[in-house]
Image: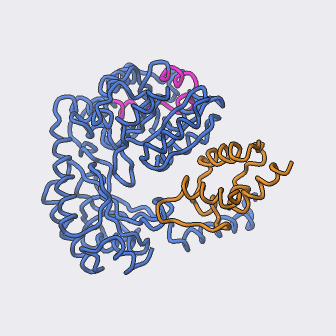
Amino acid sequence: MSYSNKIKDIYSNQLSEIHSAGIYKEERFIHSSQAADIEVEFPSGANLKKVINMCSNNYLGLSSHPDVLQAAHQGLEKRGYGMSSVRFICGTQDIHRELENKVTEFLGTEDTILFPSCMDANAGVFEAILTSEDIMISDRLVHASIIDGMRLCSAQHDTFKHSSMEHLEEKLQLHADKRIKLVITDGVFSMDGDLAKLDEMVKLCEKYDAMILVDDSHSSGFIGRTGRGTHEYFNVIGKIDVITTTFGKALGGASGGCVSGRKEIVQMCRQKARPYLFSNTISPVIVSGVLKVFDILSASTERRDKLEKNAVWWRKGLTEAGFVLKEGNSPIVPVMLFNAKLSQDFSRDLYNEGIYAIGFFFPVVPNGQARIRTQISAGHEIDHLEKALDAFIKVGKKYGILGLTKEEIVAKYGL
Amino acid sequence: MEDIKEIIRKYVINEYLEEGEEITYDTPLISSGYVDSFSMVSLLVFLENKFKIKIPPSKATPEAFDSVNKIVDLVNQFINK
């Protein structure tokens, strides 16, 4: 037997350390479709509990939309379950190209290539388009998948302080001699909910002859007047060289992602991006569902408008109740608690009150910035949000933090 | 002339730390999360330009950059050459 006790102990000890650090992740089993109201088994074996979901990426409430389900059923009937191939061997159907064209039109770019996920898009794009002569300059709070993608790339890398345009400009000057300079940012930052200053970043990129890549996974479908994303919000459509995004959040929530942007860059990905070359094509069922999502979004802005109203209502309610929030104008609304244990206790008490919202702490967020990250959906009705707000206030009172400043919460609970 | 150690400490504070954060000469920079491995390139370029030295990639390791004192030791290896 090659799995000796010695090896087993190595893993057991590592798992014990994760447990001791309080960062052991446990899944909660949901016995219903993804929606504002869900039924959860937690901990494993416990009775089912009906809770309001305040932590999903189902921003537009389309994950279980009847039209999307119907389109997925039709896709299954007409194009089958799987393709048993990567794209370039025998895994590209007419609907894959149709979806790529639809994404291109929706985002206002030149071309698009699908990936099994946005994690894969980010893992593949940098290596496909950059070499050791080039530099990647990323915001310090970009998503983990971008960090992993940069690690796989031979280009040099540097960072700038979160959203600091002065620091970015310094870095563009510092690396003026590089062949290609690629500035990299999230459109909406997933843990803080703030938007990258794309208008200013585009100006700097033009000034210093740099390209810009935006991961718009937490924006596509709802940020901007017609939901195109952060580039629409900042009026820079056509000026973002590369957009990566996901179909696993607002755009139906199943899976899949893409790189969309300059034609030559998309062609380079089609030739060289390893997750595209060596991973299976997206299932026809999902492609069919996402096509329907784009039809829904192109026909009406009703859902993103409702999401915007819900998010404004939620942020206002929490602010008036006396919580400390991260500034922002997206449906990601972090309720700041600063202390890691407090974030876990708060989350547990919310769950007991029928509200499902997760506490995040270091290393997922910076040390001393523990929080409950709430995410609003167009699937929420005001009734859901009122119940959630009542629960937040009840638990907030229990811990005596309503109306306290950051310094006062830290003084009470420590960092 | 300002002490090498203090020049490097000030650069690290200005470049990597948030407002109000402080470090000593021995504070772990990389292992404690103040400086991530991606951001090291700025520090490397700064050291090479400031002290007119060339640090080979094999010497510019996360371990060698893990505190102000360690960085000073690294710089001195090349200044004194």
Query: Is residue A327 among the parts visible in the rendering?
Result: yes
Image position, residue A413 (x, y; %): 40, 79
Q: Is residue B13 above or below residue A121?
A: below
- Residue in view at x 69 percent, y 55 percent: B65
* Left or right relative to A342: residue B22: right
Q: Which chain is blue?
A: A
Q: Which chain is orange?
A: B
| Residue sitting at the far front | B1
Q: Is residue A103 above or below residue A31?
A: above
| Residue sitting at the far left | A383
Q: Depth check: A68 or B48 in front?
A: B48
Q: Magenta stretch containing residue A270, yes or no?
A: yes
- Residue in view at x 58 percent, y 25 percent: A272
Image position, residue B66 (x, y; %): 68, 59
* Left or right relative to A254: residue A354: left
The magenta stretch is: A265-287
Q: How many marks?
A: 0
Image position, residue A215 (x, y; %): 42, 39
Q: Magenta stretch containing residue A197, yes or no?
A: no
